[in-house]
Amino acid sequence: MKTFLTIFKKEFTDTIRDRRTLFVMVIFPLLLFPILITVVTKIQSSQMRKAEEKVLRVGLITRGNAAGIRDMISRSGLRLVENIPQDSAEALLRRDSLDAIIAVAADFDREVAALKPGTVQVFFKTSDDYAIAKRRLTEIVKAYEKKLLADRLARLNLDQNFVDAIWIEEHDIASMKEMVGKTVGGFIPYLFVIFCFMGSMYPAIDLAAGEKERGTIETLLTAPVSRFQILLGKFGVVVLTGLLSAAISIVGLYLAVRTLSELPPDMMEALLGILDAKSIILVLSLLLPLTVFFAAFLLSLSFYAKSYKEAQSLISPLTIVVILPVAIGMIPGFELNSMTALIPVLNVSLATKEIIAGTIQPGLLAEVYLSLITLAAVSLYACTKWFEREETIFRGA
């Protein structure tokens, strides 16, 4: 044990002296969430506010019908542009000459008078300003529809409830924590897993391929300690840096949530509830065996590489391989079940989402743990056997 701790201390000291590793392990995960969430929230709020306050240029084609709709649009503060040929409506929108166009059918008044529905077309571009133009104009048309309906019912001497055959009362039993957790729960494990991988990657490259390139691996191998103890010391540092990177990213997320002033109080409370001690401990406990797997696999590749550069070229593309199952976990419809609980990385993504939402099932969580611990044990055993081979350590020497 004393030998392991000595090697661990030596390797960890070498690791934290590397500025690049420190940046990836500490600075980047700590600052990413506050910067990302703050910037995106500020920009989105600013853009939506501008879109809401923008004076829309609305084209109106009435063909002598629906006089009331013109008055409603005028009172809403929109800029009206009339006498537009309908065949040029799409071209005007594409050139941004107009923000939207309302076209009333030629038989609108006649159909309404006959107690039939009249046709109103709304032309817009969804890609512009969060489809604010569509929403604002639709609200005006709906208000005009209510006015026509009220007039129609009054003429027929009918009560408003005549057209309301059913009252729908919606009762959503999902808590705010569940709703927020299901929404952001797919994105959060994506970052946690990436930080675990990146936090393990640079120390693994430096402690294996880096030492081979510097020529210090031979000196270490001649020390009166077993290769397993040497590997365990390096392995412990790689696992620690991966977990620290993920843990620091959780701290960054907490700081980001605390600094958000635009969120409603109930949503803020739900987000902070997601970051309670129980959820964080469960997420980190899932990341531990996953990080063990990452560490063993990355060290194996790094020991195989002849140089630091070759190790980077071997390991860097694996980021895509790690991202893919996490990204699949973000797709709606993918849930944690007895099958997905056995798929590495994907099971962590889905289980984290359930933990954050507070809907994790103990049986499935146990299956995820068993799968990850088995994978970690097998990968560590394989890495140990790989490290004991002379042709691996001295490849290309």
Image: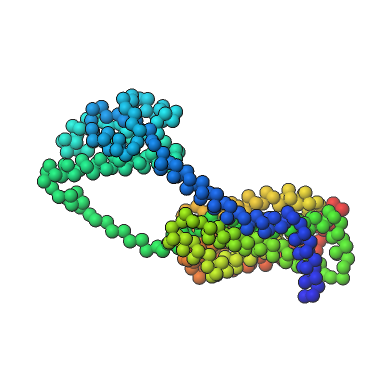
Residue 67 on image: x %, y %: 23, 32
Quadrant of the image for the N terminus?
bottom right
Q: Position of residue 96 (x, y in %)?
A: 44, 30
- Residue that sits furthest to the bottom in the current view: 1
Please state the horizontal and vertical placement of residue 105, each as a whole percent of the image. 26, 31
Q: Nearer the viewer, residue 277 or 254?
A: 254
Q: Does the rendering let one see residue 343? A: no
**Residue placed furthest toward the left:** 157
The correct choice, above or below, for 383 with respect to 164 in the image is below
Residue under the image location 81 percent in, 52 percent down:
306
Nearer to me, 385 or 368 = 368
Instruction: Give x and y (percent) for residue 202.
Output: 72, 56
Give the total of numbered labels: 0
Q: Is residue 308 left or right of residue 37?
A: right
Chosen colour scheme: rainbow
Q: Residue at 79% x, 55% y: name it.
A: 209
Looking at the image, residue 17 sits to the left or right of residue 82; the answer is right
| Quadrant of residue 286 within the rendered picture | bottom right
- Horizontally, residue 182 falls left or right of residue 288, namely left
Residue closest to the eye, 79 or 288: 79
> Which quadrant of the figure has residue 217?
bottom right
Q: Residue at x 15, y 50 (%)?
A: 159
Which residue is painted at 51% across and 46% down in the image? 43
Above-or-below relation of 308 to 353: above
Residue 19 appears in the rendering: yes
